[in-house]
Image: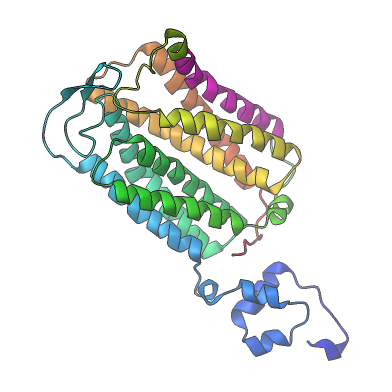
Amino acid sequence: MNLQDGYSPDYSAEFKEQIILNATSLEISSIVNISVQEVEIVTPARKANYDTEHILTIIIIVLSLITAGFGLFYNSGGAPYNFINQYGDVVKLYGRGLYRHDSFFKAPVFRGTDCTIFFIVCPLLITALIQDIRLKTLKSRMSLIAFISCFMYYAASIAFGVTYNSLLFVYILLFAACFFGLIKGLMSIDFKQVEKSMTNSLSYKGIYSFLIITGIALYAAWLPDIVTALVAKRPLLLIENYTTEITYVIDMGIIAPACFICFYLLKQRKGLGFILLEILLTLCIVIGIMLPVQTMFQIYEGIIIPLPAIITKLGSFCILALFAFNFKVQALYNMADGFKHYT
């Protein structure tokens, strides 16, 4: 069909995409209602069924397997030893493996994180990558971005929170890949398409409550530690040989505000709000899996964790993870099929 036929069809985005993917440049130029910009969207890389986001994701997977594998399996020998920190307190250090210069309390936490990343989260990211390569839908791309966000949290935690070790440059590369992968992923999605793809059968009241409770819970979990230290005019109880507590920074500085921002955007049914929701729900689920594993690694090392701490912190986050899983299933179920993302 061309202009001389006197008919100008309004092709859907999906149909246009198939035309561009399967037609030559000359054939495309004779088709009405397909602009030059739309043709340029589908690059040779897209025709090959992958894009920059997929390449960055593969880099993230490889680097994460290296960092988590070394942290979990590398054993240098040695034994715990004492160290006097900058505040004059005696701190027990782990003394062996990749985290030999980290505290005896924190090193098992890092190894528990590595175990979860290596055996659970990396396979999930690989699955999300394969799905996005195959389907190229909003569902698959949002799922991929959500898992990359989890690795962004992981990369920031080890890059800024672990005592210097031989994998520092790998941490830097992983952090960079996650950071730019997250940006590239968000840029690849048309927020208007997200808004159109969501149905009205979501349990919005439940999701609103979840977001508010999660945001408040993060401040309730960590802020008392800071207030107590300020009142006592002492450093944080578990500052040990570190200069700051990266978990407090990320949770109270980024995740909690993101919950409230997501709540506001969802009230207005904005596309970014649905994407933020997918990220937060996935992150909450992963943390709900990770915390018990971290706790088991600490108990194995003989660290005694008070029962109130297990109930208030571990228990509350695991319950939130169960709710997050329920809302994530709802969100995926209520997203209309057939909407493509464009990179």
Q: Residue 67, how many percent across, how many down?
A: 30, 47
Is 11 on the left-hand or right-hand side of 272? Answer: right
Q: Give the vertical position of 65 relative to 106 (above or below).
A: below
Quadrant in the rendering for residue 158: top left
Q: How many numbered badges does the structure rendering display? A: 0
Q: Residue 296, how many percent across, how many down?
A: 30, 26
- Is residue 35 visible in the rendered image? The answer is yes
Q: What residue occupies the far top of the structure in this picture?
A: 232
Is 200 on the left-hand or right-hand side of 262? Answer: right
Toward the viewer: 167 or 234? 234
Q: Residue 56, how many percent across, how many down?
A: 44, 59
Is 10 on the left-hand or right-hand side of 75? Answer: right
The rendered magenta stretch, by its main secondary structure, is classed as helix
Q: Residue at the spot x=34%, y=31% of the render?
A: 293
For the C terminus, which image quadrant?
A: bottom right
The question of residue 73 being in magenta is answered with no
Q: What residue occupies the far left of the structure in this picture?
A: 78
Q: Residue at the spot x=51%, y=41% of the render?
A: 282
- Is residue 329 visible in the rendered image? The answer is no
For the N terminus, which image quadrant?
A: bottom right
Q: Give the vertical position of 20 relative to 170 (above or below).
A: below
Q: Give the vertical position of 296 relative to 170 (above or below).
A: above
Q: Residue at the spot x=32%, y=36% of the render?
A: 162
Quadrant in the rendering for residue 137: bottom right
Q: Give the vertical position of 251 relative to 221 (above or below).
A: below
Q: Residue at the spot x=37%, y=43% of the render?
A: 120
The question of residue 211 being in magenta is answered with yes
- Magenta-tinted stretch: 203-227
Colouring method of the image: rainbow
Is 177 on the left-hand or right-hand side of 325? Answer: left
